[in-house]
Image (cartoon, rainbow, N blue to C red):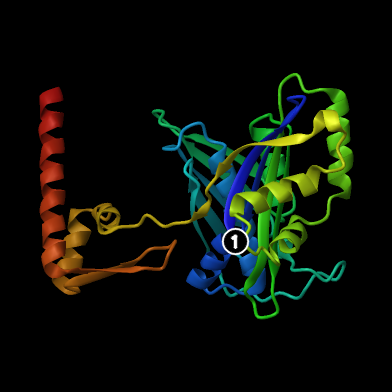
Amino acid sequence: MNKAVIGMDKSGSFRVYLAITTDLVEEARKVHGTTPVATAALGRVLTGTGLMGLMLKNEKYKLTVQFKGDGPAGEILATASGLGRVKGYISNPNIDLPLRKSDNKLDVGAAVGNGTLTVIKDQGLKEPYVGRINLVSGEIAEDLTAYFFLSEQQSTSVALGVKIDVDGTVLASGGMIIQVLPDALDEAIDALDALLQKMPPISSLVEELTENIGLKTEETVCKELLDKIFESLPEEYEVEAMEYRDIKWECDCSVARLEQVLLTLGEEELRNIAEEDKQAELTCQFCTKKYHFDKEHLDMLIRVAVRSREIKEQRNKQKE
């Protein structure tokens, strides 16, 4: 199940972005063949990035979220669009770590380690926005909360969770981002803080509500999750659903995109590959799909590279 809902409390003090991403994370697990702790880490990043994508003001805008730590996970990277399309990868999908001794749960923090969180937003401007902070815990949600506060000066709470079944598949996955709005009422924020301190793991709430869906629509289940989370708030701060959005795994790789990757190698390197190997094979990092380029295709790309160089040289001469 994949679905997101955007809501706001009656007093206009805070906005809620809430998503169930069980199928999205399960698809990523299948694509990358991740171990349970790698699934949990990648799933949290995918869910958080997907929610941040829904926060973009234009469906054509995109953002990239990169966790780069010194733990065995290596790099975890995800991208999302304003349309709710999400893709991502983890450098080491085969992490094998013992459960945390404190609570016997998957140790995502140890998998990620110390490092940096980078967020890149492509919002149609000349240069993309880039924000970077040092990781707080490597547990993903805490790091994203810190990012919003330190890099965007936005009071935000992030909750992310992935529950893994005994066979390694994704049993439940979900996430929530709550942002305090301008002119928020102190009483509303105090009530919200009290609620969040007692809130169960979001993956447990998702599991509970999706065990026996029956004929319920995804929107209905999303609304039930929203109501369940905020049911203890006073009536004047009741959270109402404003909009339902799709959120799903989708890789937009193509022959054209991989051609551009080859062209970045440069004319000389392309010639070497065409003459020595007579072929090239590239694998998409996000969906692991393989693309084969034979010598004829490589020769065509060499001609494109030559023509691009000639045009650039002509423009430089004209400027002189």
Q: Nearer the viewer, residue 265 or 186?
A: 186
Instruction: Tell me residue 276's x, y (percent).
Output: 17, 73
Q: Quadrant of the N terminus?
A: bottom right
Residue at 61%, 49% (x, y): give it: 219
Task: Determine the image quadrant of residue 127.
Answer: top left
Q: Residue furthest top?
A: 183
Q: Residue furthest bottom?
A: 167
| Residue 57 as seen in the image, left or right of residue 189 | left
Residue at 15%, 43% (x, y): give it: 308
Q: Nearer the viewer, residue 57 or 239?
A: 239
Instruction: Tell me residue 111's x, y (percent).
Output: 68, 65
Binning the other alpha carbons within 10 Å of mark 1 as few (below 14), some (14 to 19) or many (20 upward) gives many
Instruction: Say above or below: 147 vs 200.
Output: above
| Residue 249 as seen in the image, left or right of residue 151 | left
Residue at 81%, 31% (x, y): give it: 237
- Which residue matches tag 1? 42
Q: Quadrant of the C terminus?
A: top left
Instruction: Say above or below: 305 vs 150.
Output: below
Q: Nearer the viewer, residue 259 or 308?
A: 259
Instruction: Tell me residue 268's x, y (percent).
Output: 18, 57
Residue type (three-letter) at the residue carrying disc 1: Leu
Task: Determine the image quadrant of residue 234.
Answer: top right
- Residue 103 visible? The answer is yes
- Residue 320 visible? The answer is no
The mark total stands at: 1
In the structure shown, which secondary structural element does the residue marked by tag 1 occupy?
Answer: helix
Instruction: Tell me residue 160's x, y (percent).
Output: 70, 53
Instruction: Say above or below: 95 vs 25.
Output: below
